[in-house]
Amino acid sequence: MEIQKENLKKDLKDRHIQLIAIGGVIGVALFMGSAQSIKLAGPGLILSYALGGIIMYFVLRALGEVAVEYPVSSSFAGYAKAFLGPKISYMTGWTYWYMWVIICMAEISAVGLFIRFWWPDFPQWITAIVTLAIMVTVNLIAVKVYGEFEFWFALIKVCTIICMLLLGGAMILFGLGNGGVPVGFSNLWSHGGFLPFGWTGVGMALVMVTWAYSGVELIGITSGEAKDAEKSLSSAIDKVFWRVLIFYVGSCAVILSIYPWDSLGTKVSPFVSIFDKMGIPYAASVMNFVIMTSAASCLNSGLYICGRMLYGLSLRNEAPRFLGKLNSAQVPVNGILFTGAVSLIGVFLNWFAPENVFYYMGAVSVTGSIWAWMVIMLIHLKWRRGLSPEQTAKLKFPMPLYPFGNYLVIGFLLVVIVMMRLDPDNLVGLYVAPFWYGGLWLLYHLCKVGEAQKRADPTVKTEW
């Protein structure tokens, strides 16, 4: 398999990758988005998160199998060129960049939204642009600096969730914070049953679950800058699956055991409600700070990923050459700056429609995640079919249940698309998708025409 040689600095340590893997998938979608998902599925959301976790595991193992053998920052976009052709590679790289730019816009919107908890009249767009400037600077200094910031950002999120699980479990089992009276688990089935909206509700929640788990595939992108890719990747993938599954399923189970699902609002994070019920001083302020750092963490990761995607696209002649420029720290400086510039659209949206921008961006980004996961599974299928039995036996990190796992993920993603069609709040994602993918397809063919003209007449200038 031919993969472009990269010149990025391998400065991410195992502890960085372990926390980056968790931090990339635990974000505002858990702390705030879970409230909206609960309204769709009730306690059945526990099943939605569990099913999504199984799908996430197969996606990670499929990507990990190839990434351990070929660790590059272009990750599945680079593999796509070798296995699925240049057009899919081009569309995958740009779609993944697009997905994370949308997420960046959503996250700077979240920071601006939550700063108003303390200063209600403070302009949301100012917070957004300051946060963006800080995270761009962090990413430009060195990959090690990005890794350190993401390590501590992720640690804050992890500690908060562990704290909630322990305190919530003590309230359920021993009555801590509830006058010594154990809450028990009856709220899981006492208000319309465990599945108040049936399996349809579980399916409807899968859209938000897919959004919540999107970003887990960034582990593959870190492989190109890992000191020991084989050790770090295999360890991070196995650990992140169980940790994320426990954090999402466990948090959901604790919240829905303590509070009846139909009593939770969508304006306040369920985590705030839990800590407040415990009598923890300034619970709302503490949780607000955690959610803000979570948003900043996802923005930090988004800029990192986008820079590497544009760098890989440039190496494969699928993006303008200037986006492949590295600075003295071997960081793709122009790719990061370009992404930051496009993310300024999110600043404008914070000024134009501050109340709705976060949820709109979330719905739009889901289609990018669906594309990325679908491509990963197709790459893995093509990869395995090209291996001899002897080569398969020597794989360092083989995906279990091949090819069943691949088809399960593909089927799951098709169900998510159907559920987006049935949910009015997620229709915006399906409305935008044809314009994006159609525009990419058209641009690809226009660029091919330009290349053909240049070969025929060397005096013809092209941008790529």
Image (cartoon, rainbow, N blue to C red):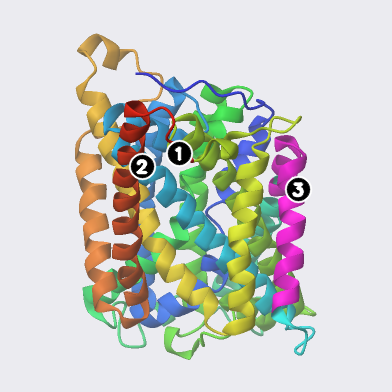
Q: Nearer the viewer, mark 2 or mark 1?
A: 1
Residue at the image point whose x is 43% and y is 20% from the top: 69
Instruction: Give the spatial CA distance, label 2 vs label 3.
Output: 34 Å
Instruction: Look at the image and tell me whether residue 403 can be seen.
Output: yes
Residue projecting furthest to the top:
390
State yes or no: residue 126 in magenta: yes
Of labels 1 and 3, earlier in sequence is: 3
Q: Which residues are magenta?
A: 125-150
* Residue density around tag 3, few if under 14, some if 14–19, many if 20 or more, within 10 Å: many
Tag 2 residue: 447
* In-image side of 75 versus 119 (left or right): left
| Quadrant housing residue 381 | top left
**Residue kind at label 2, given as amino acid type:** Cys
Contact check, label 2 and label 1, Cβ < 8 Å: yes
Label drawn at residue 462: 1
* In-image side of 117 versus 452 (left or right): right
Q: Nearer the viewer, mark 1 or mark 3?
A: 1
Instruction: Give the spatial CA distance, label 2 vs label 1.
Output: 8 Å
Of labels 2 and 1, earlier in sequence is: 2
Q: Which type of secondary structure does the marked residue at label 3 adopt?
A: helix
Instruction: Give the spatial CA distance, label 1 vs label 3.
Output: 33 Å
**Residue kind at label 3, given as amino acid type:** Val
Q: Nearer the viewer, residue 322 or 310?
A: 322
**In the displayed structure, would residue 397 be above or below residue 343?**
above
Q: Position of residue 127 (x, y in %)?
A: 74, 72
Q: Position of residue 238 (x, y in %)?
A: 47, 37
Residue at the image point whose x is 41% and y is 19% from the top: 396
Tag 3 residue: 138
* Residue density around tag 2, few if under 14, some if 14–19, many if 20 or more, within 10 Å: some
**Residue kind at label 1, given as amino acid type:** Thr
